[in-house]
Image (cartoon, helix red, strand yellow):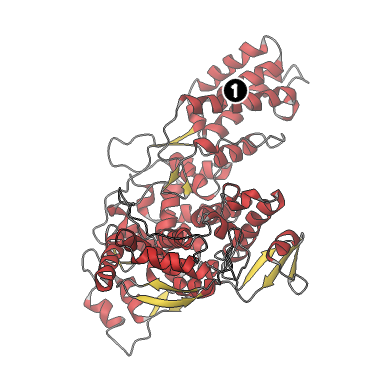
Amino acid sequence: MKKTLVLMIAACFTLACEGNGLVDGSIKDPNNTLTDKDKDNNKTNPDKEPTVIDKDGNPVKVEPEVVEKLATKCEERPEALEGVPLRVLTTNEINLALAELFPNLELEYFDMSSRDTKIGHRFVRNSQENVTAAHVVEFRKMAEAVATQVHDEVEKVANCTADPSTEVQCIRDSIEKLTTTAFRRPLEDGELDKYFTFYRVGDEINHREGMRYIVEMILQSPSFMYIFEEDNSETRQLSGREIAQHLSSMFTQSLPDEALLAAGEDGTLLTNTGRIEHARRLIESDLGKQTIKTIVSQWFGVNSIGSGPLGQLDSSIISGAELESHQLISDIVENGSDWTKLLTSDYTIVNPTMAAHYDIDISGGEDLGNNWYKVKTDYSAGLLTQSSFLAVNGTRSVHRGHNVWTDILCGTVPGAPGEINAPETFEGESDRSKQEKRMAENDCGFCHAQMEPHGIALDLFDSVGRRVSEDQFGNKLTNDGQLMNPDGTFTDIIGARGLGEQLSERKEARACVAKQMFTWAFARKLTAQDTCEIFDIEHALLTNGDNLKEALIQIVAADEFIER
Protein backbone atom coordinates (compact mmCIF):
# COMPACT_ATOMS: atom_id res chain seq x y z
CA MET A 1 0.00 0.00 0.00
CA LYS A 2 2.79 2.44 0.89
CA LYS A 3 4.61 1.80 -2.40
CA THR A 4 1.39 2.30 -4.37
CA LEU A 5 0.67 5.56 -2.53
CA VAL A 6 4.16 6.91 -3.27
CA LEU A 7 3.79 6.08 -6.97
CA MET A 8 0.38 7.72 -7.12
CA ILE A 9 1.70 10.88 -5.45
CA ALA A 10 4.69 11.02 -7.79
CA ALA A 11 2.38 10.68 -10.78
CA CYS A 12 0.18 13.50 -9.47
CA PHE A 13 3.24 15.70 -8.88
CA THR A 14 4.47 15.14 -12.45
CA LEU A 15 1.06 15.71 -14.02
CA ALA A 16 0.70 18.97 -12.14
CA CYS A 17 3.89 20.19 -13.81
CA GLU A 18 3.60 18.66 -17.28
CA GLY A 19 0.48 20.64 -18.08
CA ASN A 20 2.69 23.69 -18.61
CA GLY A 21 5.71 21.95 -20.07
CA LEU A 22 7.28 21.41 -16.66
CA VAL A 23 8.86 18.30 -15.19
CA ASP A 24 10.20 18.31 -11.63
CA GLY A 25 9.34 22.00 -11.59
CA SER A 26 11.82 22.92 -14.31
CA ILE A 27 11.21 23.80 -17.95
CA LYS A 28 11.37 21.04 -20.55
CA ASP A 29 13.15 21.73 -23.82
CA PRO A 30 10.08 21.78 -26.09
CA ASN A 31 12.08 21.21 -29.28
CA ASN A 32 15.19 19.39 -28.04
CA THR A 33 17.22 22.31 -29.34
CA LEU A 34 20.25 22.20 -27.05
CA THR A 35 23.09 22.28 -29.59
CA ASP A 36 26.35 20.37 -29.42
CA LYS A 37 28.15 23.69 -29.08
CA ASP A 38 25.96 24.62 -26.13
CA LYS A 39 26.75 21.29 -24.49
CA ASP A 40 30.46 21.54 -25.18
CA ASN A 41 30.59 25.00 -23.60
CA ASN A 42 28.70 23.91 -20.52
CA LYS A 43 27.91 20.67 -18.74
CA THR A 44 29.67 18.24 -21.06
CA ASN A 45 32.97 20.10 -20.91
CA PRO A 46 34.40 19.84 -17.37
CA ASP A 47 37.19 22.28 -18.23
CA LYS A 48 34.75 25.13 -18.78
CA GLU A 49 33.67 27.31 -15.88
CA PRO A 50 29.85 27.21 -15.92
CA THR A 51 28.58 30.76 -15.98
CA VAL A 52 25.74 32.88 -17.27
CA ILE A 53 25.69 36.63 -17.77
CA ASP A 54 23.54 38.93 -15.64
CA LYS A 55 21.74 42.11 -16.75
CA ASP A 56 24.92 44.17 -16.22
CA GLY A 57 27.12 41.85 -18.29
CA ASN A 58 28.78 40.25 -15.27
CA PRO A 59 29.29 36.46 -15.07
CA VAL A 60 27.18 34.59 -12.53
CA LYS A 61 28.39 31.15 -11.49
CA VAL A 62 25.72 28.47 -11.44
CA GLU A 63 25.62 24.70 -11.36
CA PRO A 64 26.38 22.88 -14.66
CA GLU A 65 22.91 21.37 -14.95
CA VAL A 66 21.44 24.85 -14.61
CA VAL A 67 23.68 26.11 -17.43
CA GLU A 68 22.38 23.34 -19.68
CA LYS A 69 18.86 24.36 -18.82
CA LEU A 70 19.58 28.01 -19.62
CA ALA A 71 21.05 26.98 -22.98
CA THR A 72 17.76 25.37 -23.90
CA LYS A 73 15.96 27.35 -26.57
CA CYS A 74 12.29 27.95 -27.20
CA GLU A 75 12.49 28.28 -30.97
CA GLU A 76 8.88 27.49 -31.76
CA ARG A 77 7.22 30.10 -29.59
CA PRO A 78 3.53 30.81 -30.05
CA GLU A 79 2.81 33.64 -32.45
CA ALA A 80 0.97 35.49 -29.69
CA LEU A 81 -0.14 34.95 -26.11
CA GLU A 82 -3.70 34.81 -24.88
CA GLY A 83 -4.86 38.13 -23.51
CA VAL A 84 -7.74 39.29 -21.34
CA PRO A 85 -10.10 41.23 -23.63
CA LEU A 86 -12.05 42.83 -20.79
CA ARG A 87 -11.24 43.28 -17.11
CA VAL A 88 -13.12 45.38 -14.57
CA LEU A 89 -11.03 47.40 -12.12
CA THR A 90 -10.45 45.86 -8.70
CA THR A 91 -11.33 47.61 -5.46
CA ASN A 92 -7.69 48.51 -4.90
CA GLU A 93 -7.29 49.84 -8.45
CA ILE A 94 -10.43 51.97 -8.10
CA ASN A 95 -9.28 53.59 -4.88
CA LEU A 96 -5.79 54.26 -6.20
CA ALA A 97 -7.27 55.70 -9.39
CA LEU A 98 -9.50 58.03 -7.35
CA ALA A 99 -6.46 59.20 -5.41
CA GLU A 100 -4.74 60.02 -8.71
CA LEU A 101 -7.81 61.79 -10.11
CA PHE A 102 -8.51 63.88 -7.02
CA PRO A 103 -5.18 64.34 -5.19
CA ASN A 104 -6.44 67.33 -3.20
CA LEU A 105 -9.46 65.56 -1.74
CA GLU A 106 -9.43 63.34 1.33
CA LEU A 107 -11.63 60.57 -0.04
CA GLU A 108 -12.97 57.67 1.97
CA TYR A 109 -11.86 54.14 1.05
CA PHE A 110 -14.57 52.46 -0.98
CA ASP A 111 -14.75 48.79 -0.04
CA MET A 112 -16.15 46.95 -3.05
CA SER A 113 -14.15 43.77 -2.43
CA SER A 114 -17.28 41.60 -2.29
CA ARG A 115 -17.43 41.78 -6.09
CA ASP A 116 -13.70 41.18 -6.67
CA THR A 117 -12.69 37.81 -8.13
CA LYS A 118 -9.41 35.96 -7.86
CA ILE A 119 -7.32 33.94 -10.25
CA GLY A 120 -7.15 30.57 -8.56
CA HIS A 121 -7.59 31.49 -4.92
CA ARG A 122 -5.00 34.22 -4.55
CA PHE A 123 -4.47 37.10 -7.01
CA VAL A 124 -7.27 39.67 -7.16
CA ARG A 125 -7.29 40.67 -10.84
CA ASN A 126 -10.99 40.47 -11.86
CA SER A 127 -10.24 38.85 -15.22
CA GLN A 128 -13.19 36.50 -14.76
CA GLU A 129 -15.55 39.14 -13.46
CA ASN A 130 -19.17 39.14 -14.55
CA VAL A 131 -20.73 42.51 -13.78
CA THR A 132 -24.14 42.19 -12.17
CA ALA A 133 -26.81 44.70 -11.24
CA ALA A 134 -25.41 44.71 -7.69
CA HIS A 135 -22.00 45.76 -9.02
CA VAL A 136 -23.55 48.59 -11.02
CA VAL A 137 -25.24 49.82 -7.85
CA GLU A 138 -21.88 49.81 -6.02
CA PHE A 139 -20.23 51.80 -8.78
CA ARG A 140 -23.11 54.28 -8.75
CA LYS A 141 -22.88 54.78 -4.99
CA MET A 142 -19.12 55.31 -5.25
CA ALA A 143 -19.54 57.81 -8.10
CA GLU A 144 -22.26 59.71 -6.24
CA ALA A 145 -20.19 59.92 -3.06
CA VAL A 146 -17.12 61.23 -4.88
CA ALA A 147 -19.21 63.65 -6.96
CA THR A 148 -20.82 65.04 -3.81
CA GLN A 149 -17.42 65.69 -2.30
CA VAL A 150 -16.29 67.38 -5.52
CA HIS A 151 -19.43 69.54 -5.31
CA ASP A 152 -18.62 70.55 -1.75
CA GLU A 153 -14.91 71.20 -2.42
CA VAL A 154 -15.00 72.15 -6.10
CA GLU A 155 -12.26 74.75 -5.69
CA LYS A 156 -9.82 71.85 -5.05
CA VAL A 157 -10.75 70.22 -8.36
CA ALA A 158 -11.78 72.96 -10.80
CA ASN A 159 -11.41 76.45 -9.33
CA CYS A 160 -12.61 78.26 -12.43
CA THR A 161 -15.16 80.92 -11.46
CA ALA A 162 -12.86 83.64 -10.15
CA ASP A 163 -12.12 85.13 -13.58
CA PRO A 164 -15.11 85.21 -15.98
CA SER A 165 -12.82 85.82 -18.99
CA THR A 166 -11.09 82.43 -18.56
CA GLU A 167 -13.91 80.49 -16.90
CA VAL A 168 -15.06 78.45 -19.91
CA GLN A 169 -11.55 77.45 -20.97
CA CYS A 170 -10.65 76.58 -17.40
CA ILE A 171 -13.68 74.30 -17.11
CA ARG A 172 -12.96 72.61 -20.44
CA ASP A 173 -9.33 72.07 -19.42
CA SER A 174 -10.43 70.59 -16.08
CA ILE A 175 -12.88 68.22 -17.78
CA GLU A 176 -10.30 67.17 -20.36
CA LYS A 177 -7.72 66.41 -17.67
CA LEU A 178 -10.20 64.36 -15.63
CA THR A 179 -11.48 62.37 -18.59
CA THR A 180 -8.13 61.63 -20.23
CA THR A 181 -6.66 60.54 -16.88
CA ALA A 182 -9.68 58.42 -15.92
CA PHE A 183 -10.03 56.84 -19.37
CA ARG A 184 -6.27 56.27 -19.76
CA ARG A 185 -6.33 57.67 -23.29
CA PRO A 186 -6.62 60.94 -25.23
CA LEU A 187 -10.16 62.06 -26.04
CA GLU A 188 -11.48 61.44 -29.52
CA ASP A 189 -12.71 64.20 -31.82
CA GLY A 190 -15.87 65.79 -30.45
CA GLU A 191 -15.69 63.89 -27.17
CA LEU A 192 -14.72 66.91 -25.06
CA ASP A 193 -17.65 68.88 -26.51
CA LYS A 194 -20.00 66.07 -25.48
CA TYR A 195 -18.77 66.10 -21.89
CA PHE A 196 -18.80 69.89 -21.71
CA THR A 197 -22.44 69.83 -22.87
CA PHE A 198 -23.24 67.40 -20.09
CA TYR A 199 -21.49 69.71 -17.62
CA ARG A 200 -23.76 72.53 -18.84
CA VAL A 201 -26.85 70.59 -17.74
CA GLY A 202 -25.76 70.89 -14.14
CA ASP A 203 -24.22 74.30 -14.68
CA GLU A 204 -27.70 75.69 -15.24
CA ILE A 205 -27.89 75.58 -11.45
CA ASN A 206 -24.27 76.47 -10.67
CA HIS A 207 -20.65 75.42 -11.30
CA ARG A 208 -20.67 73.01 -8.37
CA GLU A 209 -23.62 71.09 -9.80
CA GLY A 210 -21.99 71.03 -13.22
CA MET A 211 -18.88 69.38 -11.79
CA ARG A 212 -21.02 66.96 -9.78
CA TYR A 213 -22.74 65.86 -13.02
CA ILE A 214 -19.52 65.40 -14.97
CA VAL A 215 -17.73 63.46 -12.18
CA GLU A 216 -20.67 61.07 -11.79
CA MET A 217 -20.63 60.47 -15.52
CA ILE A 218 -16.87 59.84 -15.71
CA LEU A 219 -16.75 57.42 -12.80
CA GLN A 220 -19.62 55.30 -14.18
CA SER A 221 -18.26 55.22 -17.72
CA PRO A 222 -17.07 51.85 -19.07
CA SER A 223 -13.91 53.66 -20.17
CA PHE A 224 -13.07 54.16 -16.49
CA MET A 225 -14.43 50.92 -15.04
CA TYR A 226 -12.80 48.54 -17.51
CA ILE A 227 -9.36 47.74 -18.86
CA PHE A 228 -9.90 46.33 -22.33
CA GLU A 229 -7.98 45.47 -25.45
CA GLU A 230 -9.34 47.27 -28.45
CA ASP A 231 -9.44 44.55 -31.10
CA ASN A 232 -9.14 40.80 -30.58
CA SER A 233 -10.44 39.60 -33.93
CA GLU A 234 -7.00 38.45 -35.12
CA THR A 235 -3.37 38.24 -34.04
CA ARG A 236 -1.93 41.70 -33.68
CA GLN A 237 0.42 43.93 -31.73
CA LEU A 238 -1.03 45.93 -28.85
CA SER A 239 -1.16 49.67 -29.30
CA GLY A 240 1.06 51.95 -27.22
CA ARG A 241 -2.03 53.07 -25.33
CA GLU A 242 -2.94 49.48 -24.41
CA ILE A 243 0.62 48.71 -23.33
CA ALA A 244 0.62 51.80 -21.10
CA GLN A 245 -2.49 50.69 -19.24
CA HIS A 246 -1.15 47.13 -18.87
CA LEU A 247 2.14 48.41 -17.44
CA SER A 248 0.41 50.74 -14.99
CA SER A 249 -1.96 48.00 -13.85
CA MET A 250 0.87 45.50 -13.46
CA PHE A 251 3.35 47.73 -11.63
CA THR A 252 1.27 50.37 -9.82
CA GLN A 253 -2.38 49.15 -9.87
CA SER A 254 -3.29 52.68 -10.85
CA LEU A 255 -3.74 54.95 -13.84
CA PRO A 256 -0.91 55.55 -16.33
CA ASP A 257 0.99 58.72 -15.50
CA GLU A 258 1.73 61.40 -18.10
CA ALA A 259 5.17 59.99 -18.92
CA LEU A 260 3.76 56.53 -19.55
CA LEU A 261 0.90 57.84 -21.71
CA ALA A 262 3.36 59.92 -23.72
CA ALA A 263 5.59 56.87 -24.21
CA GLY A 264 2.57 54.97 -25.45
CA GLU A 265 1.64 57.68 -27.93
CA ASP A 266 5.13 58.22 -29.37
CA GLY A 267 5.87 54.52 -29.84
CA THR A 268 8.48 54.14 -27.08
CA LEU A 269 6.51 51.33 -25.42
CA LEU A 270 6.57 49.32 -28.62
CA THR A 271 10.29 48.74 -28.03
CA ASN A 272 11.78 46.34 -25.48
CA THR A 273 14.14 48.99 -24.12
CA GLY A 274 11.29 51.48 -23.76
CA ARG A 275 9.14 49.05 -21.79
CA ILE A 276 12.06 48.07 -19.56
CA GLU A 277 12.90 51.71 -18.84
CA HIS A 278 9.37 52.55 -17.77
CA ALA A 279 8.93 49.26 -15.89
CA ARG A 280 11.99 50.07 -13.78
CA ARG A 281 10.71 53.59 -13.16
CA LEU A 282 7.27 52.37 -12.12
CA ILE A 283 8.44 49.54 -9.89
CA GLU A 284 10.66 51.93 -7.92
CA SER A 285 7.87 54.47 -7.42
CA ASP A 286 5.87 54.64 -4.20
CA LEU A 287 2.92 52.92 -5.89
CA GLY A 288 5.29 50.35 -7.35
CA LYS A 289 6.65 49.48 -3.93
CA GLN A 290 3.12 49.15 -2.61
CA THR A 291 2.25 46.88 -5.53
CA ILE A 292 5.17 44.57 -4.71
CA LYS A 293 3.72 44.20 -1.21
CA THR A 294 0.31 43.45 -2.72
CA ILE A 295 1.70 40.81 -5.09
CA VAL A 296 3.61 38.93 -2.39
CA SER A 297 0.83 39.35 0.19
CA GLN A 298 -1.76 37.88 -2.16
CA TRP A 299 0.63 35.15 -3.30
CA PHE A 300 1.21 33.99 0.29
CA GLY A 301 -2.37 34.66 1.37
CA VAL A 302 -1.43 37.15 4.09
CA ASN A 303 -3.85 39.84 2.89
CA SER A 304 -7.10 38.44 4.34
CA ILE A 305 -6.25 38.58 7.99
CA GLY A 306 -9.59 39.88 9.25
CA SER A 307 -11.42 36.84 7.86
CA GLY A 308 -9.30 34.32 9.80
CA PRO A 309 -8.69 33.59 13.49
CA LEU A 310 -6.84 36.90 13.93
CA GLY A 311 -10.12 38.65 13.14
CA GLN A 312 -11.33 37.69 16.59
CA LEU A 313 -8.52 39.61 18.28
CA ASP A 314 -7.99 43.31 18.97
CA SER A 315 -7.87 45.51 15.87
CA SER A 316 -4.30 46.51 16.74
CA ILE A 317 -3.25 42.86 16.29
CA ILE A 318 -5.06 42.62 12.94
CA SER A 319 -3.40 45.72 11.55
CA GLY A 320 -0.09 44.92 13.23
CA ALA A 321 0.08 41.44 11.67
CA GLU A 322 -0.57 42.80 8.18
CA LEU A 323 1.97 45.58 8.60
CA GLU A 324 4.52 43.12 9.98
CA SER A 325 4.30 41.13 6.74
CA HIS A 326 4.53 44.30 4.66
CA GLN A 327 7.62 45.37 6.58
CA LEU A 328 9.34 42.04 5.92
CA ILE A 329 8.34 42.00 2.24
CA SER A 330 9.71 45.52 1.81
CA ASP A 331 12.94 44.67 3.61
CA ILE A 332 13.53 41.65 1.39
CA VAL A 333 12.09 42.40 -2.03
CA GLU A 334 12.45 46.16 -2.33
CA ASN A 335 16.05 45.97 -1.17
CA GLY A 336 16.92 43.43 -3.87
CA SER A 337 17.32 40.28 -1.76
CA ASP A 338 16.30 37.03 -3.39
CA TRP A 339 12.78 35.67 -3.03
CA THR A 340 13.92 32.65 -0.97
CA LYS A 341 14.44 35.01 1.99
CA LEU A 342 10.64 35.18 2.18
CA LEU A 343 10.89 31.56 3.40
CA THR A 344 14.16 31.56 5.31
CA SER A 345 14.94 34.94 6.92
CA ASP A 346 15.93 34.44 10.53
CA TYR A 347 14.31 37.66 11.72
CA THR A 348 10.99 39.45 11.77
CA ILE A 349 10.07 43.13 11.96
CA VAL A 350 7.61 43.96 14.72
CA ASN A 351 6.09 46.87 16.57
CA PRO A 352 5.52 46.70 20.35
CA THR A 353 2.00 45.31 19.84
CA MET A 354 3.19 42.36 17.76
CA ALA A 355 6.22 41.85 20.00
CA ALA A 356 3.86 41.40 22.95
CA HIS A 357 1.67 39.11 20.85
CA TYR A 358 4.66 36.83 20.11
CA ASP A 359 6.32 37.42 23.51
CA ILE A 360 9.44 38.74 21.74
CA ASP A 361 11.98 40.96 23.50
CA ILE A 362 12.67 43.93 21.22
CA SER A 363 15.26 45.53 23.47
CA GLY A 364 18.11 43.94 21.53
CA GLY A 365 16.57 44.47 18.11
CA GLU A 366 17.51 47.02 15.46
CA ASP A 367 15.40 50.17 15.73
CA LEU A 368 14.11 50.92 12.21
CA GLY A 369 12.16 53.98 13.29
CA ASN A 370 8.42 54.63 13.54
CA ASN A 371 8.22 52.07 16.35
CA TRP A 372 9.37 49.11 14.22
CA TYR A 373 12.17 46.76 15.29
CA LYS A 374 14.11 44.14 13.37
CA VAL A 375 14.53 41.19 15.71
CA LYS A 376 16.28 37.86 15.16
CA THR A 377 14.76 34.74 16.68
CA ASP A 378 15.81 31.10 16.82
CA TYR A 379 12.70 29.98 14.93
CA SER A 380 11.87 32.68 12.35
CA ALA A 381 11.45 31.51 8.77
CA GLY A 382 10.30 34.54 6.82
CA LEU A 383 6.57 34.78 6.22
CA LEU A 384 6.09 31.14 7.24
CA THR A 385 6.30 32.05 10.93
CA GLN A 386 4.25 35.24 10.89
CA SER A 387 0.74 35.40 12.29
CA SER A 388 -0.68 36.63 9.00
CA PHE A 389 0.39 33.42 7.22
CA LEU A 390 -0.25 30.97 10.04
CA ALA A 391 -3.66 32.36 11.01
CA VAL A 392 -5.00 32.79 7.50
CA ASN A 393 -4.12 29.20 6.77
CA GLY A 394 -5.68 27.76 9.93
CA THR A 395 -4.32 25.63 12.74
CA ARG A 396 -4.49 22.17 11.22
CA SER A 397 -1.48 20.88 9.34
CA VAL A 398 -3.64 20.06 6.34
CA HIS A 399 -4.62 23.71 5.78
CA ARG A 400 -1.11 25.08 6.14
CA GLY A 401 0.36 22.20 4.17
CA HIS A 402 -2.17 22.69 1.39
CA ASN A 403 -1.21 26.32 0.91
CA VAL A 404 2.51 25.57 0.89
CA TRP A 405 1.88 22.83 -1.67
CA THR A 406 -0.30 24.90 -4.00
CA ASP A 407 1.16 28.42 -3.60
CA ILE A 408 4.88 27.79 -3.14
CA LEU A 409 5.31 24.55 -5.10
CA CYS A 410 2.38 25.07 -7.51
CA GLY A 411 1.22 21.52 -6.88
CA THR A 412 -2.37 20.47 -7.43
CA VAL A 413 -4.69 18.67 -5.05
CA PRO A 414 -7.64 16.75 -6.50
CA GLY A 415 -11.07 17.60 -5.13
CA ALA A 416 -12.46 15.44 -2.37
CA PRO A 417 -14.45 12.39 -3.53
CA GLY A 418 -18.23 12.54 -3.23
CA GLU A 419 -18.30 10.23 -0.23
CA ILE A 420 -15.50 10.10 2.31
CA ASN A 421 -15.09 7.48 4.99
CA ALA A 422 -13.34 9.79 7.42
CA PRO A 423 -11.26 8.01 10.06
CA GLU A 424 -12.76 7.87 13.53
CA THR A 425 -11.29 10.22 16.11
CA PHE A 426 -12.04 10.92 19.75
CA GLU A 427 -12.11 14.06 21.89
CA GLY A 428 -8.71 14.82 23.28
CA GLU A 429 -6.86 12.81 20.62
CA SER A 430 -3.56 14.37 19.60
CA ASP A 431 -3.24 16.16 16.29
CA ARG A 432 -0.36 13.87 15.27
CA SER A 433 -2.57 10.81 15.81
CA LYS A 434 -5.33 12.34 13.68
CA GLN A 435 -2.82 13.25 10.98
CA GLU A 436 -1.50 9.70 10.78
CA LYS A 437 -5.03 8.33 10.52
CA ARG A 438 -5.92 10.68 7.68
CA MET A 439 -2.79 9.76 5.72
CA ALA A 440 -3.38 6.03 6.25
CA GLU A 441 -7.05 6.13 5.21
CA ASN A 442 -7.71 4.88 1.65
CA ASP A 443 -10.13 7.69 0.82
CA CYS A 444 -8.03 10.44 2.40
CA GLY A 445 -4.42 9.33 2.27
CA PHE A 446 -3.70 10.09 -1.37
CA CYS A 447 -4.34 13.81 -0.98
CA HIS A 448 -3.36 14.30 2.64
CA ALA A 449 0.06 12.72 2.10
CA GLN A 450 0.82 15.57 -0.32
CA MET A 451 0.05 18.23 2.28
CA GLU A 452 0.24 17.13 5.88
CA PRO A 453 3.80 15.77 6.19
CA HIS A 454 5.27 19.25 5.68
CA GLY A 455 2.32 21.05 7.32
CA ILE A 456 3.31 19.25 10.52
CA ALA A 457 6.51 21.33 10.56
CA LEU A 458 4.34 24.33 11.53
CA ASP A 459 2.50 22.58 14.38
CA LEU A 460 4.29 24.52 17.14
CA PHE A 461 2.22 27.63 16.28
CA ASP A 462 -1.35 28.14 17.42
CA SER A 463 -4.26 29.55 15.44
CA VAL A 464 -2.98 33.13 15.72
CA GLY A 465 0.71 32.42 15.18
CA ARG A 466 1.95 32.23 18.77
CA ARG A 467 4.41 29.52 19.76
CA VAL A 468 2.95 26.64 21.74
CA SER A 469 4.20 23.28 22.99
CA GLU A 470 0.88 21.60 23.81
CA ASP A 471 -2.58 21.50 22.29
CA GLN A 472 -5.77 22.43 24.15
CA PHE A 473 -5.96 18.91 25.63
CA GLY A 474 -2.42 18.91 26.97
CA ASN A 475 -0.98 16.69 24.23
CA LYS A 476 2.63 17.47 23.41
CA LEU A 477 3.11 18.96 19.94
CA THR A 478 6.00 18.12 17.63
CA ASN A 479 7.30 19.70 14.43
CA ASP A 480 9.29 16.90 12.81
CA GLY A 481 7.82 16.65 9.34
CA GLN A 482 8.64 15.59 5.81
CA LEU A 483 8.61 17.32 2.43
CA MET A 484 7.71 15.20 -0.57
CA ASN A 485 10.21 14.97 -3.41
CA PRO A 486 9.24 14.92 -7.10
CA ASP A 487 9.79 11.15 -7.22
CA GLY A 488 7.35 10.53 -4.38
CA THR A 489 9.97 9.96 -1.67
CA PHE A 490 10.26 12.25 1.34
CA THR A 491 12.94 14.45 2.90
CA ASP A 492 12.90 14.87 6.68
CA ILE A 493 12.49 18.43 7.97
CA ILE A 494 12.40 19.98 11.42
CA GLY A 495 10.27 23.03 12.06
CA ALA A 496 9.40 26.05 9.95
CA ARG A 497 13.02 26.89 9.27
CA GLY A 498 13.74 23.41 7.98
CA LEU A 499 10.68 23.64 5.76
CA GLY A 500 11.69 27.05 4.42
CA GLU A 501 15.25 25.94 3.68
CA GLN A 502 14.06 22.86 1.81
CA LEU A 503 11.52 24.84 -0.21
CA SER A 504 14.11 27.45 -1.16
CA GLU A 505 16.31 24.74 -2.68
CA ARG A 506 13.59 23.17 -4.81
CA LYS A 507 13.67 23.75 -8.56
CA GLU A 508 9.91 23.41 -8.65
CA ALA A 509 9.64 26.28 -6.16
CA ARG A 510 11.51 28.64 -8.48
CA ALA A 511 9.34 27.48 -11.38
CA CYS A 512 6.32 28.24 -9.21
CA VAL A 513 7.58 31.76 -8.57
CA ALA A 514 7.79 32.26 -12.34
CA LYS A 515 4.22 31.02 -12.73
CA GLN A 516 2.95 33.29 -9.97
CA MET A 517 4.61 36.38 -11.47
CA PHE A 518 3.24 35.53 -14.92
CA THR A 519 -0.25 35.07 -13.48
CA TRP A 520 -0.15 38.50 -11.86
CA ALA A 521 1.21 40.18 -14.99
CA PHE A 522 -1.25 38.67 -17.46
CA ALA A 523 -4.22 38.56 -15.04
CA ARG A 524 -5.22 35.07 -16.12
CA LYS A 525 -4.55 31.40 -15.51
CA LEU A 526 -1.65 29.67 -17.23
CA THR A 527 -2.13 27.75 -20.45
CA ALA A 528 0.08 25.25 -22.28
CA GLN A 529 1.22 27.95 -24.72
CA ASP A 530 2.90 29.90 -21.89
CA THR A 531 5.76 27.41 -21.44
CA CYS A 532 8.40 29.58 -23.09
CA GLU A 533 7.36 32.66 -21.14
CA ILE A 534 7.66 30.76 -17.86
CA PHE A 535 11.11 29.63 -18.96
CA ASP A 536 12.14 33.23 -19.61
CA ILE A 537 11.00 34.32 -16.16
CA GLU A 538 12.87 31.43 -14.54
CA HIS A 539 15.92 32.43 -16.56
CA ALA A 540 15.56 36.01 -15.29
CA LEU A 541 15.40 34.75 -11.71
CA LEU A 542 18.49 32.59 -12.13
CA THR A 543 20.56 35.32 -13.78
CA ASN A 544 19.52 38.10 -11.41
CA GLY A 545 20.03 36.56 -8.00
CA ASP A 546 16.40 35.38 -7.72
CA ASN A 547 15.28 39.02 -7.64
CA LEU A 548 11.48 39.25 -7.98
CA LYS A 549 11.53 42.74 -9.44
CA GLU A 550 13.85 41.65 -12.23
CA ALA A 551 11.58 38.69 -12.95
CA LEU A 552 8.60 41.02 -13.39
CA ILE A 553 10.62 43.30 -15.65
CA GLN A 554 11.65 40.32 -17.79
CA ILE A 555 7.98 39.68 -18.53
CA VAL A 556 7.43 43.07 -20.17
CA ALA A 557 10.76 42.91 -22.01
CA ALA A 558 9.58 39.96 -24.10
CA ASP A 559 8.03 40.56 -27.52
CA GLU A 560 5.19 38.25 -26.53
CA PHE A 561 4.05 40.74 -23.89
CA ILE A 562 2.68 43.01 -26.62
CA GLU A 563 1.39 40.35 -29.04
CA ARG A 564 -2.17 39.01 -28.91
Q: Is residue 102 left or right of residue 27?
A: right
Hey, what amino acid is under mark 1? Glu
Q: Residue at point 56% right, 35% down? A: 112
- Residue at screen point 51% across, 56% down: 393
Residue 153 or residue 412, whichever sits in front: 412
Residue 213 found in image quarter: top right
Query: Foreground residue, 548 or 8?
Result: 8
The residue identified by callout 1 is 216
In the picture shown, does residue 374 fall above or below 88? below
Please identify the quarter of the rendering in which residue 174 is found. top right
Q: Is residue 512 visible?
A: yes
Residue 462 placement, left or right of 353: left
Q: Quadrant of the N terminus?
A: bottom left
On the image, the x and y values in percent for residue 293 come to 57, 55
- Quick one: SS at disc 1? helix
Question: Residue shown at 73%/61% (left/top)?
Answer: 351
Q: Residue 413's x, y, as percent?
A: 35, 57
